[in-house]
């Protein structure tokens, strides 16, 4: 008989369970293919599974719970031993060295625990332990150095080894065998990654779980855990959603981006370029996002679509042109223009593939000056993301904020309004249910809809979109990298002078 320990909590009224990736375990080959049709959810929660076909990548990593054979001393004692053996579980339950002998008394098994047995059909017993939510960003940085607040194009090595590499090994991985003096954050070695996963997503088989959770009857029994967590009367305070200063917010953003980049590199989910750190992830199966986006009624009605110039959205730009949509792509290097405009009516079929690329957009597109932007109405804005909270709609880009600024300019010029749908296309591993709301400020752009290769997610859209540019957040580097801002500011000043 085995016991499975499931720490559970409520995130935005959704029951979640803490599971882990164990990258020390070499995953078996998998030929399982996900269904081609998306699953549509309203205000759903995240998934950290993946949509990989066997002809693309032969191996899968699975989420797994803490599990152990029940000791002769009983199931409660076994749960205590599991908790004592994990630094993350010790942190969750605030277990100190002096608490180990009386851990059964420290943890309120009577009020915060639910044991669920399955009878003769399986040898599994679930121990669900209700706890106040602690961010997965905290849990994954226990004994880990914090990432730099701005890490662009870091050189990283992801050699999976049974023991920690020496500095000489790290230097060899960098191609510099003569140097053993490397920064602490140069080499990322994550054996375990812990994530809060929605029980609903587990039951709907939207995540890759290992055979422990696939035992007969377990998925159906998880409904009991879900009901118990939902009806729990304990008050939960999420300390990560309280007001935080800018330095703390930047650290949370850096942790979230780095965690997603690390997971996607270790799971081999990136096509190119490598490493993904500092970039918008160009993930495998991103063409499936185009298929799912096409099923949106808003896309079918849309005439003008603005899509970010990232490599990950190149197929989506091609797909939109092929569907007859007028495509707008940001033109950040032009002084007095916000977009390139591509109308498929004036393009040959053999030019569409080239038009979807950055260089092709500049060569084949028509420049849309700032003064002409207001003549357009953008129906859908597709923005690039590194991390997304699929429940609230909070998102993080790669840290430059250009997409937020471009949207604010469109809003001020009248090209966007409340009818404009804001969409992002991401991999399932980029979804983080407990990305705190504190990362969003008034100038950050949230999303209405999240499209993954597997499904369509309608967020709760808890944040308002930026309607004007807050010049207090625009620094000199941004002004240099987006020269259109200077012209936009000049036009706004002229307009203000006319009104006065």
Image: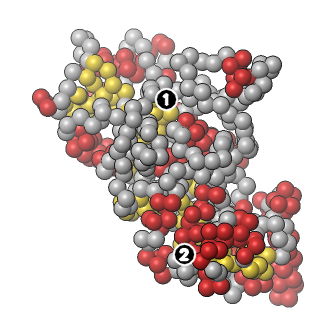
Judged left or right of residue 235, residue 489 is: right
Tally the marks: 2
Q: Secondary structure at mark 1?
A: loop
Residue 272 screen position, x and y as percent: 63, 47
Residue 126 screen position, x and y as percent: 26, 31
Judged left or right of residue 169, residue 189 is: left
Seen at 38% across and 20% down, the residue is: 82
Q: Which of the two discs, 1 and 2, sits closer to the camera? A: 2
| CB under 8 Å between discs 1 and 2 | no
Residue nearest the viewer, comparing 349 with 377: 349
Bin the neighbour count of mark 2 within 10 Å (Cα to Cα): few under 14, some 14-19, many 20 and up: some
Judged left or right of residue 196, residue 475 is: right
Q: Is residue 199 visible?
A: no
Q: How far apart are labels 1 and 2 at the CA level? A: 41 Å
Indicate the quadrant where residue 185 lies: top right
Label at residue 322: 2
Taking 263 as reference, is 344 above or below it?
A: below
Seen at 35% across and 45% down, the residue is: 32
Seen at 57% across and 63% down, the residue is: 315
Label at residue 448: none
Indicate the quadrant where residue 479 lies: bottom right
Residue nearest the viewer, comparing 58 with 320: 58
Judged left or right of residue 169, residue 242 is: left
Label at residue 23: 1
Residue 140 screen position, x and y as percent: 55, 33
């Amino acid at each position: 008989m085995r016991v499975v320990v499931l720490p559970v909590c409520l995130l935005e009224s959704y029951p979640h369970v803490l599971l882990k990736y164990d990258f020390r375990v070499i995953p078996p080959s998998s030929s399982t293919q996900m269904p081609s049709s998306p699953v549509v959810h309203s205000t759903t929660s995240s998934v950290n599974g993946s949509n990989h076909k066997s002809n693309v990548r032969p191996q899968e990593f699975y989420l797994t719970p803490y599990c152990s054979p029940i000791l002769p001393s009983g199931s409660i004692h076994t749960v205590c031993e599991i908790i004592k053996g994990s630094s993350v579980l010790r942190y969750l339950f605030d277990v100190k060295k002096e608490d180990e002998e009386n851990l059964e008394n420290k943890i309120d098994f009577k009020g915060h625990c639910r044991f669920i047995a399955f009878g003769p059909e399986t040898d599994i017993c679930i121990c669900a332990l209700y706890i106040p939510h602690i961010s997965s960003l905290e849990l994954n940085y226990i004994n880990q150095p914090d990432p730099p607040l701005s890490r662009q194009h870091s050189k990283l090595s992801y050699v999976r080894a049974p023991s920690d590499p020496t500095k000489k090994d790290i230097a060899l991985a960098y191609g510099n065998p003569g140097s053993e003096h490397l920064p602490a954050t140069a080499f990322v070695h994550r054996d375990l990654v812990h994530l809060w996963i929605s029980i609903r997503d587990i039951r709907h088989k939207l995540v890759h779980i290992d055979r422990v959770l696939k035992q007969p009857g377990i998925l159906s029994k998880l409904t009991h855990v879900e009901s118990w967590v939902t009806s729990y009367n304990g008050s939960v305070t999420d300390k990560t959603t309280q007001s935080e200063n800018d330095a703390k917010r930047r650290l949370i953003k850096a942790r979230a981006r780095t965690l997603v980049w690390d997971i996607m590199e270790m799971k081999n989910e990136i096509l190119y370029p490598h490493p993904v750190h500092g970039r918008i992830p160009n993930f495998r199966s991103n063409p499936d996002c185009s298929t799912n986006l096409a099923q949106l009624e808003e896309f079918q009605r849309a005439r003008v679509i603005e899509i970010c110039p990232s490599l990950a959205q190149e197929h989506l730009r091609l797909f939109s042109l092929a569907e007859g949509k007028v495509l707008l792509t940001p033109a950040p290097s032009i002084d007095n223009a916000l977009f390139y405009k591509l109308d498929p009516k004036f393009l040959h079929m053999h030019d569409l593939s080239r038009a979807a690329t950055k260089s092709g957009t500049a060569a084949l597109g028509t420049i849309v000056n700032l003064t002409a932007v207001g003549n357009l109405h953008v129906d859908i804005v597709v923005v690039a993301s590194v991390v997304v909270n699929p429940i609230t709609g909070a998102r993080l880009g790669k840290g430059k904020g250009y997409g937020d600024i471009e949207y604010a300019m469109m809003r001020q010029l009248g090209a966007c309004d409340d009818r404009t749908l804001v969409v992002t296309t991401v991999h399932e591993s980029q979804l983080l249910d407990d990305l705190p709301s504190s990362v969003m400020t008034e100038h950050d752009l949230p999303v209405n809809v999240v499209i993954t290769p597997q499904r369509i997610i309608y967020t709760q859209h808890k944040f308002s979109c930026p309607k004007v540019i807050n010049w207090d957040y625009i620094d000199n580097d941004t002004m240099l990298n987006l020269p259109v801002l200077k012209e936009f500011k000049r036009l706004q000043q002229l307009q203000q002078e006319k009104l006065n």
